[in-house]
Amino acid sequence: MKCSISCVLDRSRKFYRQFIVWSRSLDMVDPGRALHRIAFHVGDIPAEMTDFARRNGIELVQVPPFGLAASPYCNKLGQLSHLARSGADYLIMSDIDIAFMASPAGLIEAGKIRAKIVDQPNPPGDRLRELLSEMGFPDATLDRCPDFAPGHPTHRYNCNGGLYVLPRTCLDLVGERWIDWTMQCSRKIGLLRDAAIHIDQLGFMLAMIELDLPFEPLATEDNFPTHFEPEAYARWRPAEIRALHYHHRIDVDGRLQPTGATAVDIWVDRANQALAISRDEYARFDPVLCD
């Protein structure tokens, strides 16, 4: 079975730091490089990053910007046509701000699309119901509650965009509809308001409702957020975290920042110790990374 994992590398010092962490974490959990690694980039990237990718066995593919100003996250959809031609049996689309603590190949379930329900109800339930109705799905039910927002139901296919597991057999179907629904959501900015930045996630949700493809949700520990305030983690005592989705919580030395919640920060500390990215290593990329 051939499996590829991809991310999108945009132009920013923050993203360059995250790219190094992403690559280092994959080396840690997949030392034999069984996963084919691809980094898609919009526009040119510095030679230092190109050299880093080549040294670390990461294929670089330039894609045009997706072109929806409402959501910068839509650039990830530029991957879909390339991934459909990759020849891999399974494709894992990852945000660049994820540090893996276990091999993402372990997330594969035969023939099933996988993703994790959103951490927060984005958009809120009333707006989501209105969107579903306007898109032709008035009977779609909000029957799942996000782990970090109990009591605020959302749709089971309203998934966090940080990690998708896609069988190639499903990719042609879901990819085309995902893009089309995202474009339709881009015309609903007045309804979505601040949630418009998540139209790529809503496009996925609508494609899955329409197509009803085999689906198995990921656990929160497969894509665990570390950007909330400490009180958000009061009930969490994770026995294992398989991927840390740290968002902006990274310092200039490439270390993941703690949450302030001891049970979660055990895993943040483990990641930092295992990755052990030094300031000297970052200095090789001056002035690309260092302020």
Image (cartoon, rainbow, N blue to C red):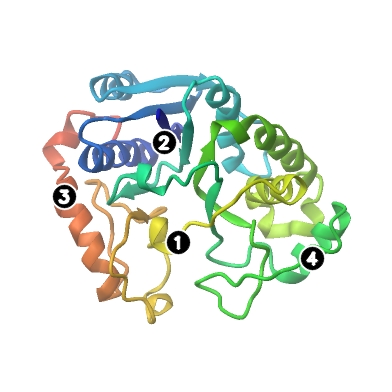
Q: Which residue is mark 2?
A: 12
Front position in the image: 77 or 166: 166
Q: In the structure shown, which secondary structural element does the residue marked by tag 4 occupy?
A: helix
Q: Mark 1 touching mark 4, by CB under 8 A?
A: no
Q: Which residue is mark 3?
A: 274
As drawn, the label of residue 75 is: none
Spatial CA span between label 1 and label 4: 25 Å
Q: Amino acid at mark 3?
A: Ala
Spatial CA span between label 1 and label 3: 23 Å
Q: Nearer the viewer, mark 3 or mark 2?
A: 3
Q: Position of residue 37 (x, y in %)?
A: 37, 28
Q: Position of residue 165 (x, y in %)?
A: 50, 43
Spatial CA span between label 2 and label 1: 30 Å
Q: Amino acid at mark 2?
A: Ser
Spatial CA span between label 3 and label 4: 44 Å
Q: Residue at x 64, y 76 (%)?
A: 152
Q: Residue at x 32, y 48 (%)?
A: 99
Q: Which image quarter holds the C terminus?
A: top left
Q: Which residue is mark 4?
A: 129
Q: Which residue is mark 1?
A: 219
Q: Nearer the viewer, mark 2 or mark 1?
A: 1
Q: Does residue 19 appear to the left or right of 157 in the view shown?
A: left
Q: Position of residue 54 (x, y in %)?
A: 28, 19
Q: Earlier in the sequence, mark 1 or mark 4?
A: 4
Q: Earlier in the sequence, mark 2 or mark 1?
A: 2
